[in-house]
Image: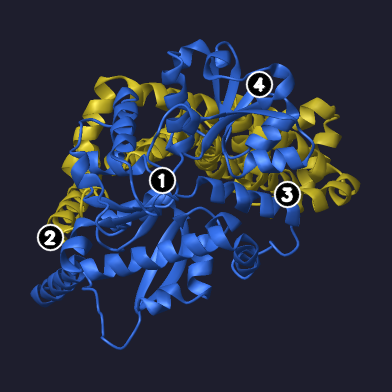
């Protein structure tokens, strides 16, 4: 019996030891560093900048072999926070929320300059500014994520509360909901749903969050350990991504063609709509200068999140982001 | 005395098993160096439980999900029993409907849940329907098996006693089919919880599925654990209720 207990104990110890072991970042000098990058969404032409950076060899030039991972955004952030992964693509609001929960994550490169959320409605309803949303039925994917944060920021700008309108959580079905007319307005990604709806002949009014408030948008996330132990990797990662962004801005048609290799079904999709989505995405890109994150956008974001009770405590924003690697 | 000892022994083993589970969980989280936003300690989860229990949010979301589950279970049960009876009684109806029923079972509920939100709106009905849909098949199959398992001799006996259609259903078919039917209900009751949560995952602003989404969105893994454990307790409670129902309704079977 004692022998069995001993064996069981040994197995348990081995299991716990295995779990505790963090895999150190292996970087043989002559081999590429393999990076798994959570993108936060399904394969999409919106990621053309990264597909292009891989295909044009910008990552390989920096000694990086990139693997795309289309897991949930929050899973990617949690894995970066736990140092299981080194990088993730992330929407700006996730960084203060995660840091307030104790995740040591750091935003190192702005990809989008403008916050990509908008409230859209059929033009005949004449909803043109946030104040016009009072008393309306508004649908959004859920009470979480960029859609909710952007929407609440707009309400705040109009001094409206959630109780001043009817809010409906409908999942990612905004196009169908607006087409069916069951809601007056829907909260969407600027570069996606409006392009699809306009292609179907809908005449839309759009209220862009970025027209009212400067908020931190999509960018590249890493963690404190990677910055302190391997700053060169961060620099190389940012450099390759920025080259991809710049190349896509300058050569959208080529970037679109490259995306076909990564996005299943893009070849057979409505080319005009998909190209429209890419052009709308490029309009959101960071261009002045590439990769730079504006301090005011971070302050605004923290204020919005605190008002929404999505953060228990204020964080030191200087620890949440850095422009050191993008300059 | 013997009965009490037997009961204590039974409960003692359950408590011991839970205690060992908690100790292993605590040891794992302590020695593995995994941060709490990836895998919280039992203590973190307990603290979160107390916090959401105190502010009433856990009870509110639990009642929402329970309402969806009970309504979904009722709808699924009713539809499956009626269809099951028709299918068991008529080979023609079975031939006509079975391709649709079997095909519907190969569709993952998560794939059609977003469509239900579009068709029925984001309110409670889409969650009730996802719950009912997932309950439907096991109850249907067991209803068919139960009705068809009634021995032919008993039908002949009822005929010789000149029983009418309703007497045959109430005195023969329902009691004879009940053991198998309740077996289906056991599975259906636990599946009903999954169905409601799938509906809440797609689009909801209340319910335990919504609470899981909130926990994930805020990197509050303790909240995810509290919601999941509450769902487990909900499913176990429903399962226990069916077992209790079985013991009451099938007491004649034990006597046999």
Q: Give the mark, 4 or 1, whose residue is nearer the N terminus.
A: 1
- Both on one chain, marks 2 and 1? no
* Mark 4 residue element: loop
Mark sitting on residue A91 = 1
State which mark lies toward you, 2 or 4: 4
Pointer 2: what residue? Answer: B31
The answer for which chain carries disc 4 is A
| Tag 3 near tag 4, CB within 8 Å | no
Separation of residues labelled 2 and 1 (CA atoms): 33 Å
Pick whichever, A312 or B225, lies toward us: A312
Mark sitting on residue B104 = 3
Q: Colour of chain B?
A: yellow
Crowding at dot 4, Cα within 10 Å, few <14 / some 14-19 / many 20+, comes out as some
Q: Which chain is blue?
A: A
Residue at 13% from the left image edge and 74% from the top image edge:
A10
Pointer 4: what residue? Answer: A184
Separation of residues labelled 2 and 4 (CA atoms): 53 Å
- State the image coordinates of residue A24 (x, y, percent, origin top left): 21, 73
Answer left or right for B47 relative to A256.
left
Pick whichever, A281 or A193, lies toward us: A281
Separation of residues labelled 3 and 4 (CA atoms): 33 Å
């Amino acid at each position: 019996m004692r022998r069995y207990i001993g064996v069981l104990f040994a197995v348990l110890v081995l299991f716990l030891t295995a779990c505790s072991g963090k895999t150190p970042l292996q970087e043989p000098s002559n081999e590429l560093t393999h990076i798994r990058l959570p993108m936060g969404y399904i394969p999409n032409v919106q990621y053309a900048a990264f597909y292009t950076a891989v295909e044009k060899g910008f990552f390989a030039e920096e000694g990086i072999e990139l693997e795309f991972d289309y897991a949930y955004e929050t899973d990617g952030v949690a894995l970066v926070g736990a140092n299981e992964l080194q990088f993730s693509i992330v929407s700006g609001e996730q960084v203060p929320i995660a840091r307030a929960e104790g995740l040591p994550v750091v935003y190192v490169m702005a990809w989008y300059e403008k916050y990509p959320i908008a409230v859209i409605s059929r033009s005949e309803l004449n909803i043109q500014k946030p104040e016009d949303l009072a008393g309306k039925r508004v649908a959004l994917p859920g009470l979480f994520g960029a859609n909710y944060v952007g929407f609440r920021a707009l309400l705040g700008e109009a001094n409206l509360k959630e109780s001043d309108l009817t809010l409906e959580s409908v999942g990612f079905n905004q196009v169908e909901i607006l087409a069916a007319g069951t809601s007056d307005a829907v909260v969407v990604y600027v570069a996606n749903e409006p392009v699809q709806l306009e292609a179907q002949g809908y005449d839309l009014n759009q209220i862009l969050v970025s027209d009212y408030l400067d908020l931190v948008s999509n960018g590249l996330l890493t963690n404190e350990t990677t910055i302190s132990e391997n700053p060169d990797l961060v620099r190389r990662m940012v450099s390759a991504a920025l080259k991809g962004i710049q190349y896509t801005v300058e050569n959208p048609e080529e970037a679109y063609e490259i995306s076909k290799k990564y996005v299943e079904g893009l070849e057979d999709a409505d080319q005009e709509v998909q190209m429209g989505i890419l052009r709308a995405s490029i309009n959101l890109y960071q261009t002045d200068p590439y990769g730079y994150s504006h301090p005011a956008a971070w302050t605004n974001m923290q204020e919005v999140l605190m008002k929404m009770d999505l953060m228990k405590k204020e964080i030191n924003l200087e620890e949440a982001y850095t422009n050191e690697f993008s300059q | 005395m013997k009965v009490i000892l037997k009961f204590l022994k039974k409960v003692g083993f359950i408590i011991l098993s839970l205690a060992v589970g908690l100790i292993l969980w605590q040891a794992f989280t302590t020695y593995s160096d995994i941060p709490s936003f990836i895998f919280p300690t039992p203590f973190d989860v307990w603290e979160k439980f107390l916090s959401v229990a105190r502010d009433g949010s856990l009870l509110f979301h639990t009642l929402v999900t329970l309402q969806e589950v009970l309504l979904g279970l009722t709808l699924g049960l009713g539809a499956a029993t009626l269809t099951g009876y028709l299918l068991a009684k008529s080979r023609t109806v079975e031939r006509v409907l079975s391709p649709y029923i079997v095909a519907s079972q190969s569709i993952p509920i998560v794939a059609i849940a977003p469509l239900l939100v579009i068709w029925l709106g984001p309110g409670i009905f889409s969650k009730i329907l996802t719950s009912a849909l997932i309950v439907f098949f096991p109850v249907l199959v067991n209803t068919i098996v139960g009705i068809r398992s009634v021995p032919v001799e008993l039908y002949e006996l009822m005929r010789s006693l000149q029983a009418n259609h309703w007497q045959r259903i109430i005195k023969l078919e329902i009691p004879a089919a009940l053991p198998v039917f309740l077996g289906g209900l056991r599975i259906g009751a636990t599946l009903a919880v999954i169905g409601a949560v799938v509906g809440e995952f797609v689009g909801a602003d209340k319910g335990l599925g919504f609470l899981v989404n909130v926990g994930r969105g805020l990197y509050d893994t303790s909240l995810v654990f509290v919601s999941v454990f509450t769902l487990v307790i909900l499913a176990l409670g429903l399962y226990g209720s069916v077992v209790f129902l079985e013991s009451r309704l099938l007491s004649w079977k034990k006597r046999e």
